[in-house]
Amino acid sequence: MEEKKLDVKSIIGFVLIFGILIFMFYQNKPTPEELEAQKAKQEQMDAAAAAEEESPEKLVIDDTPSVDLNDSTAVAGYKSQIGAFGFTTPKEGNTVLENEVLYLEISNKGGHVVQAKMKNFVTYDSVPVYLVKDGNSAYSINFSTSDNRVLNTKDLYFEPSVTQSGDNQVLSMRAKTSNNQYLEYRYEMKPNEYLVDFTVRTQGLDRILNSSKPVTFDWKMKGIRHSKSIEYENRYTRLTYHHEDGKLSKLSAGGDDEETEEDIKWISYRQHFFSSILATDEPFKTGELSSENLVEEESRTFGFTKNYASVLPLDVKGGEISKNMHLYYGPTDLEVLSKYKDLDLVDSIPFGWGIFGWINRYVFTPFYSFLSTYFPYGIAIIIMTILVRLAMSPVTYKSYLSQAKMKVLKPEIAELNEKYKDNAMKKQQETMKLYGKAGVSPMSGCVPAFLQMPIFYALFMFFPTSFALRQKSFLWADDLSSFDTIYQFPEGFSIPFYGDHVSLFPILASIAIFFYMMMTTGQNMPTQPGMPNMKFIMYLMPFMMLFFFNNYASGLSLYYFVSNLITIGIMLVIKNFILDNDKIHAQIQENKKKPKKENKFQRKMREMMEQAEAQKKK
């Protein structure tokens, strides 16, 4: 009776400690003034480092030299080089298309987007999010003419014309060979949309284009850094594409990669939380795709993550080109991308594969979005964690029941270990026989863990990639989609596999995991021959988690911290108020008396072990 009173007091103490921790976290949360001071200091450090560092990030993709329009000789040379397209008078300048959410600049030289800015989002250092800027991206058409010239639209000057179509802005960029003959890029921007309709077509060029030579659309982009950790951002920066009527594939996230595919519907140059997507109404027949990793190590100043490139064929029919496409510059957000169902752009979000992605997409993402509309973002994570753990409590009960049965059998297993200490085969055989008679499966405690794996992996993908968590703060964490930092190591100093900072949430999560494993693995699981030492794993796992989660989303560490605290509480309740060891022992003894019918697998295993034992005696 006295033991139960002590356990109840322990539970009350545990709850009080948790409450005190939460209160302290709130009290110690940095003030807005302190956060601004820290941000200003970091900006000064980054600016000083950037001024001193000469790096490859200064290279640009669109480095085509412009024609000196004030030099008549240069202009004449340009017109001679491009032949019939010299009809268009060269004129420098950009045309602006913008709505409530997106700002674009399209250059006369090349006719392509040279600036794409998000109006409602900023980077970690409060700079507007640019997907295209300073020549990091270019797309163009390579083609041959009937007079044996090989031209590229990046070298051509286009003539802009802006009109209105209802509420939509329409920009026509034409590289002309005469007043009625031209190659046109047509852009149509709708209000409040990140998706811009993009059409490539020609008129009257059937005698100028050489249709016997391939015509290709080339799109290159260098991903611009937006997060405080370039290595962390680069993990989720990836070229993804939709092809062959429903297949979704990706190039390597951690290295250089290239593929040649067929029937490509869209290509996404994902930069973690933002994406540049080229989609088409009629799939490209083939496509050569490549991704080059630019991040070799963590850096506070390096500005780019990956080099992307795609080469896509354009059909020439009747000597003319006509291709309806779409350009998306915007957030990798379920709510936004779901608007474009016909293009299946929502599939570009990295939910995870198989059932894990399904859980993430249709359960956790909408569920968290619902909670965050009523509660602060960190509190919404805690509430979601509580509800998930309560939903999984029957699985926790099954797991603890299995451990309780194993604990009851521990003395008998110890006797078998002593009796057959010189015969490992016999010891294993008798141990399995004991489990069979008692109606206990040593694997039954593992089954609940496997049942929780889909939840574990879905959440593992949810927190780092959920746009709803981006730049949302809680306690000392200023971004729940990235790691929290309570101490930043001096520049140039980093611990291998750990990082250049100390995160508090992973420390708390590791401590909670350690106590959880003490209550389960460390005390109740006997060590079997050929099995790993459970106590070693008990100490190793929290240590590994501490290193692993130090560079992951703080929302994920917060989830595991709260989840393990709740699981410990549930297990204490199960242990002290639900399970009765005496009843479990009595039930096991009853099971032993019942005749045990072997299934085919059990019989086969017994026969194999008996044959092995007989062979050993011979």
Image (tube, rainbow, N blue to C red):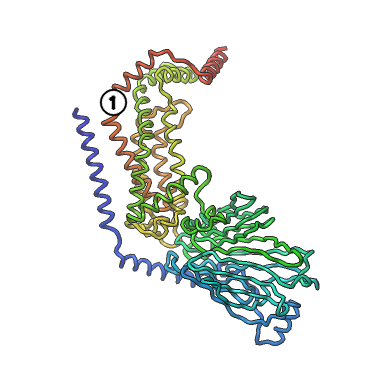
Furthest residue in direction right, as rendered: 147
Image quarter in which the C terminus is found: top right
Inspect the image, locate mark 1, and give the three-letter code of the amino acid beneath it.
Asp
Quadrant housing residue 612: top right
Query: Mark 1 falls on what kind of element?
Result: loop
Residue in view at x 70 percent, y 74 percent: 182
Please, is residue 476 above or below residue 615 in the view? below
Please, is residue 317 above or below residue 546 in the view? below
Of residues 126 and 264, which is closer to you in this image? 264
Residue in view at x 45 percent, y 17 percent: 433
The reply to whether residue 600 is visible in this rendering is yes
Quadrant housing residue 209: bottom right
122 relative to 389 in the view: left or right: right
Quadrant housing residue 490: bottom left
Task: State the image coordinates of residue 2 (x, y, percent, origin top left).
Answer: 19, 29
Of residues 186 and 434, which is closer to you in this image? 186
Which residue is denoted by mark 1 in the rendering? 580
Task: State the image coordinates of residue 10 (x, y, percent, origin top left).
Answer: 23, 38
Task: State the image coordinates of residue 323 (x, y, percent, origin top left).
Answer: 66, 64
Task: State the image coordinates of residue 219 (x, y, percent, origin top left).
Answer: 63, 64
Of residues 136 and 121, which is closer to you in this image? 121
Image quarter in which the N terminus is found: top left
Please, is residue 444 above or below residue 220 in the view? above
The reply to whether residue 78 is visible in this rendering is no
